[in-house]
Image: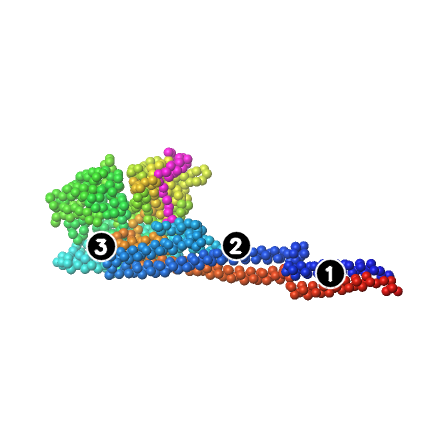
């Protein structure tokens, strides 16, 4: 075979081109640092690189998000830490106030310092970082706490991005910090009436008439004292046979169920026995103690829930002494003349048609009227107070009935006018009931009408009955506030009517909202049941915004709920289904309930009784005059629009509220309930305000003698501060956990980023040393090929011969 020059070129030229391409590729890898530039060069490597690049971008996003959240979280942690330090200072001032050595001036100085600390706490609550408020939830532009301590943020969490479907919260919302709850806290409540041992206080009446009253001792009741020591007596006889001491107990258990029961006791039974029976009413057994019922050092009953996490526990008790037996309805105690023993008392009272007297067992010539005279702003009435500021506006006259000092019947009428004062009523009573001059004196002391008769003139029986303009009996006189429980009228404040019982969902202890069903809060299950004949009936009575009296009834039934006003035909309460129908009582919501209340109090009723269009129109029209809301504490409140002071006045309660032949109330809205010492739920600034008020009022403990009757006092407030501090510490721990989680996430992400960068480098980056070596080899090969080509080019025929 003959080898020609062209054959050399055919073999060497492709090799030269191949090596030249490889040299180009290697030079490109060295200059760019990457093995490939385009997907077609190595599709698998390109796809893997894209995936790794995406992961690196994600890591960068995570690091940026975590760093931002970490700064926010660390500032939150620091601010809550300042909260706990400030609360320690606050507690120190409170403990100083608890000392009996303080003068009035020093107490007010302490209160002023505590107000200053309160202002600092508000400023801390409104801390912002880079224009973002720490404790507003996700509403970072909204100032969370106003001057009154109200929260304006939300309960939302803000989160840092930690990867696909992984987020970490970095904020503590004000809803948790200021209004949160502690599931491990047990609710504890107390009565506020202090009880002295009556036998020691009145030995001349209860032990021996020859003993002087000056030998009396003031000692608070103990569990070993007898019932007679607790309630007192008007003679020296100890009745060990007849159970003439009656205690009417109402309450709410841990699970939200309610009860009413009457406990009858003999004189010689002990106060400890009474406490045991109270515990049994709550469900205590020999094997299971669901509540602790104790007596504090001031003869007040304290009850603690043994199961933590519930805010439903409540208690009310009233006692009376009646040899004829217990009454079946608490309203009777306002007028039957028996001696009433008080345990819990506040400024709020209910309405009664007739009120009567209550004799002093230790002085037969002294007695009081079973009526608390308070203005509509809850201030004690004085002799100069107008009756229109005390009584409902629809009272036209008061019948002065019963018997006079000599036992003869009395029947006179006192007309109530716009200018009638408390003193005018006192004068009329004095004139009407006395027979001989000076055999009766009537006065007003601490909001109560007091009577004193001449010795031996104890046949008097005072009975006052309210009448409307047509002289019909009217349920409009204020009752003895200690007797009223959940039929008490709402508190008036300017254009507002305020309730005090939070509506709490039984299942999770949360506050009810507009969407919550009444059955989710109500004490009974089933709430209503057509087959079992279970219905619920609510009473709403009082004065509407125009000053007109009303008496309304809301009937909740499974077959459809209705309401009526002043005996009108039943108005259908419509649901939102299609077609519209009367709402099942089990499905009725608080929004539907507040709509009905607003229509009644604003006197804006539907044009027809069962037309959905008219019903909706009435709701819309009523909102032009007033609004009934369910606030963030689950309390139902009324506000008249555009009015400085509303004429409205309402009581809203279960129809069986005072009837002890029936079970406990299905729903409660406003009550003379026990005072709260500890509770799982927190209302930070409201509690701080209450604590400071106890110092301002120099109120050492819960009582009915000083300041606000519903204030728990300085000694109980110390426990409240401890609870707030515990809550703050737990929230700080939560913030610390969030910060640590973010730091760990940041460290982990940085590590993953380094690892992923290394993997990406292995996949795509050029190994410079290896590429340089390869370049040198290719250059040698390239030079060799050129050398070969050069040699071939120099060959002639002579070389082949």
Task: Check whether the beta carbons of the residues at disc 1 and disc 2 lie within 8 A of each other.
Answer: no
Numbered label attached to residue 231: 3
Mark 1 packing: few (<14 Cα in 10 Å), some, or many (20+)? some
Which quarter of the image is occupied by the C terminus? bottom right
Identify the residue under disc 1.
19
In the figure, is residue 621 to the left or right of 781?
left
- Residue 234 percent location from the top left of the image: 17, 53
Identify the residue under disc 2.
165
- The residue stretch that appears in magenta: 607-633
In the figure, is residue 750 to the left or right of 721?
right
Relative to 392, is 341 above or below? Answer: below
In the figure, is residue 385 to the left or right of 594?
left
Tell which of 691 and 128 is nearer to you.
128
Tell which of 769 and 247 is nearer to you.
769
Q: Is residue 273 visible?
A: no
Q: Residue 468 occupies which quadrant of the picture?
A: top left
- Residue 153 percent location from the top left of the image: 41, 50
């Amino acid at each position: 075979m003959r080898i020609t020059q062209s054959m050399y070129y055919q073999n060497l030229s492709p090799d030269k081109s191949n090596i030249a391409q490889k040299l180009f590729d290697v030079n490109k890898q060295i200059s760019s640092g990457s093995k490939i530039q385009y997907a077609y060069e190595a599709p698998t490597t390109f796809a893997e690189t894209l995936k790794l690049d995406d992961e690196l971008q994600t890591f960068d996003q995570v690091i940026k998000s975590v760093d931002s959240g970490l700064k926010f979280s660390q500032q939150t942690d620091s601010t809550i830490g300042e909260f706990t330090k400030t609360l320690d200072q606050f507690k120190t001032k409170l403990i100083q106030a608890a000392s009996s050595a303080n003068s009035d001036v020093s107490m007010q100085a302490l209160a002023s310092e505590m107000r200053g600390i309160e202002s600092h706490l508000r400023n801390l609550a409104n801390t912002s970082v880079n224009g973002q408020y720490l404790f507003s939830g996700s509403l970072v532009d909204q100032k969370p706490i106003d001057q009154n301590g109200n929260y304006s943020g939300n309960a939302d969490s803000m989160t840092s991005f930690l990867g696909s479907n992984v987020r970490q919260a970095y904020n503590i919302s004000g809803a948790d910090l200021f209004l949160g709850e502690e599931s491990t806290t047990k609710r504890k409540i107390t009565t506020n009436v202090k009880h002295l041992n009556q036998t020691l206080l009145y030995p001349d009446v209860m032990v021996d008439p020859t003993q002087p009253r000056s030998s009396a001792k003031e000692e608070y009741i103990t569990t070993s004292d007898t019932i007679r020591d607790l309630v007192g007596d008007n003679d020296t006889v100890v009745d060990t046979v007849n159970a003439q001491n009656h205690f009417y107990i109402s309450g709410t258990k841990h699970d939200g169920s309610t009860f009413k029961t009457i406990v009858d006791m003999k004189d010689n039974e002990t106060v400890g026995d009474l406490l045991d029976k109270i515990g049994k009413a709550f469900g205590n057994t020999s094997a299971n103690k669901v509540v602790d019922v104790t007596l504090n050092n001031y003869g007040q009953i304290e009850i603690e829930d043994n199961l933590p996490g519930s805010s439903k526990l409540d208690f009310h008790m009233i006692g009376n002494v009646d040899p004829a037996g217990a009454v079946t309805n608490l309203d009777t105690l306002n007028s039957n003349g028996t001696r009433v023993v008080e345990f819990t008392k506040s400024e709020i009272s209910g309405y009664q048609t007739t009120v009567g007297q209550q004799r002093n067992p230790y002085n037969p010539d002294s007695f009081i009227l079973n009526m608390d005279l308070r203005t509509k702003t809850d201030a004690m009435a004085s002799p100069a107070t107008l009756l229109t500021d005390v009584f409902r506006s629809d009272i036209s006259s008061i019948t002065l009935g019963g018997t006079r000092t000599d036992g003869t019947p009395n029947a006179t009428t006192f007309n109530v006018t716009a200018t009638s004062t408390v003193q005018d009523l006192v004068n009329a009573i004095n004139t009407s009931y006395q027979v001989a001059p000076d055999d009766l004196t009537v006065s007003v002391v601490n909001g109560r009408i007091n009577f004193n008769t001449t010795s031996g003139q104890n046949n008097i029986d005072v009975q006052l009955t309210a009448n409307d303009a047509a002289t019909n009996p009217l349920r409009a006189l204020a009752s003895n506030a200690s007797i009223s429980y959940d039929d008490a009228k709402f508190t008036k404040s300017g254009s507002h009517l305020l309730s005090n019982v939070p509506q709490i969902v039984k299942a999770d202890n949360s506050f009810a909202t507009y969407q919550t069903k009444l059955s989710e809060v109500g004490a009974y299950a089933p709430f209503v049941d057509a087959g079992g004949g279970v219905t619920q009936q609510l009473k709403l009575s009082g004065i509407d915004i125009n000053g007109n009296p009303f008496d309304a009834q809301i009937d909740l039934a499974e077959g459809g709920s209705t309401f009526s006003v002043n005996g009108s035909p039943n108005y259908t309460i419509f649901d939102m289904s299609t077609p519209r129908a009367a709402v099942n009582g089990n499905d009725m919501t608080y929004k539907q309930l507040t709509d009905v209340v607003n229509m009644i109090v604003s006197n804006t009723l539907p044009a027809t009784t069962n037309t959905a269009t008219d019903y909706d129109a009435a709701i819309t029209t009523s909102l032009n005059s007033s609004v009934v809301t369910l606030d963030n504490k689950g309390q139902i409140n009324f506000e008249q629009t555009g009015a400085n002071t509303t004429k409205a006045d309402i009581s809203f309660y279960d129809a069986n509220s005072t009837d002890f032949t029936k079970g406990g109330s299905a729903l409660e809205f406003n009550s003379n309930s026990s005072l709260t010492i500890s509770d799982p739920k927190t209302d930070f600034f409201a509690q701080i305000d209450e604590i400071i008020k106890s110092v301002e009022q120099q109120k050492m403990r819960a009582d009915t003698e000083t300041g606000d009757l519903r204030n728990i006092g300085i000694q109980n407030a110390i426990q409240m501060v401890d609870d707030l501090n515990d809550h703050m510490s737990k929230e700080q721990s939560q913030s610390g956990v969030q910060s640590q989680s973010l730091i760990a996430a940041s460290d982990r992400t940085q590590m993953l980023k380094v690892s992923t960068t290394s993997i990406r480098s292995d996949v795509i980056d050029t190994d410079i040393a290896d590429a340089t070596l390869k370049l040198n080899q290719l250059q040698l090969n390239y030079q060799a090929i050129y050398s070969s080509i050069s040699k071939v080019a120099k060959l002639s025929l002579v070389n082949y011969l």
